[in-house]
Image (cartoon, rainbow, N blue to C red):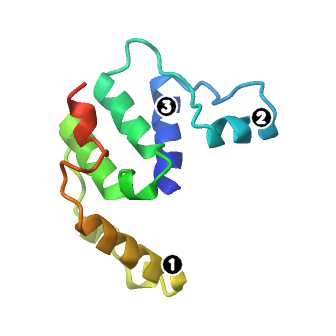
Amino acid sequence: MVEAILCYLVWEIMTNGATPYEGLPNAKVKEMMLQGQHNKFPEDTDPQVVGLVHSCWLKDPAFRCTMGEVAKYMANLTGIPQPPMSTYASKELTPKSPARSRSSSRSRLISKRTIQSRTCIQSRRSK
């Protein structure tokens, strides 16, 4: 879910601050999102950025980009290096809830897949 929110932020940046789903009531926005209908990008948007964002909106979380993948891909695309993870690491921020076990099970699921079988980014490069 965090990845989808990040990608809406990217969409807002690429549209010079446009409001997603402008003028639509929340119920309609929810319905559209559940049907996989998302805002369109301006025609001159880099196709790699569009592909990255679309990969964050996939229904199956196992095929969505992770935040780390998004950061790495954007660093490669823009040429701006990622800050070291130690910048953000903190024992106080380490999850101590059931979310940790969910995350680790997702990691096991993803680690069984090869990068070529992941929809995230890889398949978008061929377009």
Residue 3 in percent (x, y) is at 46, 51
Quarter of the image that includes the C terminus: top left
What secondary structure is marked by label 3? helix
Which quadrant of the figure has residue 33?
top right
**Residue assigned mark 2:** 28
Q: Nearer the viewer, residue 100 or 92?
A: 100
**Residue assigned mark 3:** 11
| Left or right side of 45 for 19 | right
Contact between marks 2 and 1 (CB within 8 A): the answer is no
Q: Residue at x 24, y 68 (%)?
A: 111
| Left or right side of 81 for 43 | right
Q: Residue at x 53, y 47 (%)?
A: 5
Name which residue type carries label 3. Answer: Trp
Q: Residues within 10 Å of mark 3 (few under 14, many from 20)?
A: many
* Vertical side of 29 occupied by 14: above or below: above
Label ID, residue 81: none
Of all residues shown, which one is farthest toward the top?
Answer: 43
Which quadrant of the figure has residue 107?
bottom left
